[in-house]
Amino acid sequence: MSTTEPLPAETRAWTVEHPGPVGGPPPGPLAWGRRALGAPGPQDILVEVEACGVCRTDLHLAEGDLSPRLARCTPGHEVVGRVLAAGAGVGGFAVGDRAGVAWLARTCGGCGYCRSGRENLCPESRYTGWDRHGGYAGHLTADARFAYRLPEGPPAEELAPLLCAGIIGYRALERAELPAGGLLGIYGFGASAHLTAQVALARGARVAVFTRAAAARRLALELGAVFAGDSYDPPPQPLDAAVLFAPVGELVPVALAALDRGGTLAVAGIHLTDIPVLNYQQHLFQERTLRSVTANTRADGLAFLAEAARARPVVHVTRYPLRRADAALADLAADRVTGVAVLVPE
């Protein structure tokens, strides 16, 4: 293991103790304390966290929408930090390097999905902040093969949201198959959506945003959207493609009905409330398509980070001290966050 400094034996961390609603009476689902740090494995890096984005998936884990897969798991999978140590088998990272740790934590590498470039569908896939402890902490370990080298210039809190909000939005945009110069509908306008909109605009698309939050509608127009309305408003004209970021199944038929002939709706979330009964003629006929989005591949991550380096999307950050991660999740649940919430060390 390559390091010249003593490694920390434990770290400050939040853990999911009792999944349930956030923002209610104490004690709530999360607990703040200290957690032991195991020694990094041969393929692992030990990272000191500089910033960690707050994702709606973290909220789903805390509230029990996602069944826990690791006891007392530390959430967080949009992590920017510095490498403190690297295992003997690690290539591509050295002590002191800036690293990004994202949602996809490991795949088997040998199944048909992995061999065909679809590792996001690997049955053995594992995830940061769900199967492995995540970044709501001072430190974490990560498989270096699934981490990203990050540039030195941008602030950590602006890079962190790119690692999930950005990457999954990129994959959702690809799945939506928006034609060149087309009109993209975006339903929900949080962390991922406000980055995806900017990528689409940089590609020459037009963007229409549908969200219940007035502050989010104002931000959408400031970023260049041609329309910003309520979640159930009709579009100014039929949409060529759409992405659903809000975890609200009731919006699926709304978005499908707003599509033009041949349009595609991509559902970007890991969790969605029940979808109402669809009417074939109204929602799917004329070759409208409904598609899901499942995680991402490392190739998606590399492609998005390269595109973001060119497009330089503006990341609208609300900073929270690490000790206030529970408040950040409560604000996210109540739609009090415009843009993206990011945890930073105190």
Image: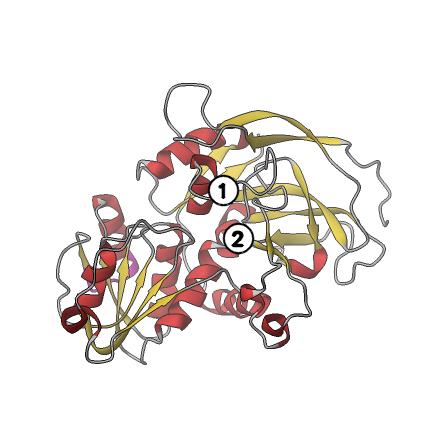
Helix, strand or loop at mark 1: loop
What residue is shown at x 58% (from left), y 61% (from top)? 123
Q: Which residue is mark 2?
A: 159
Where residue 207 appears, as percent x and y from the top left, is 26, 66
What residue is shown at x 31% (from left), y 37% (from top)? 336
- On residue 126, the disc is none
In the visual, does 243 lie left or right of 171?
Answer: left
In the visual, does 23 lie left or right of 96?
Answer: left
Q: Main secondary structure of the magenta part?
A: loop
Picture quadrant of residue 51? top right
Q: Which residue is mark 1?
A: 67
Callout 2 amino acid: Leu
The coloring applied to the image is secondary structure
Task: Determine the CA span between mark 1 and mark 2.
Answer: 28 Å
Helix, strand or loop at mark 2: helix
In the visual, does 232 lie left or right of 340?
Answer: left
| Residue 170 forms part of the magenta stretch | no
Task: Name the N-terminal-most of marks 1 and 2.
Answer: 1
- Nearest the viewer among 233 and 153 is 233
| Residue extent of the magenta highlight | 223-227
Q: Residues within 10 Å of mark 1 (few under 14, many from 20)?
A: few
Choose mark 1 or mark 2, whichever is in front.
1
| Residue 226 forms part of the magenta stretch | yes
Where 169 falls versus 130 (above or below)? Answer: below
- Nearest the viewer among 8 and 142 is 142
Where residue 260 appears, as percent x and y from the top left, is 19, 75
Where 107 falls versus 237 (above or below)? Answer: above
Callout 1 amino acid: Ser
Picture quadrant of residue 286? bottom left
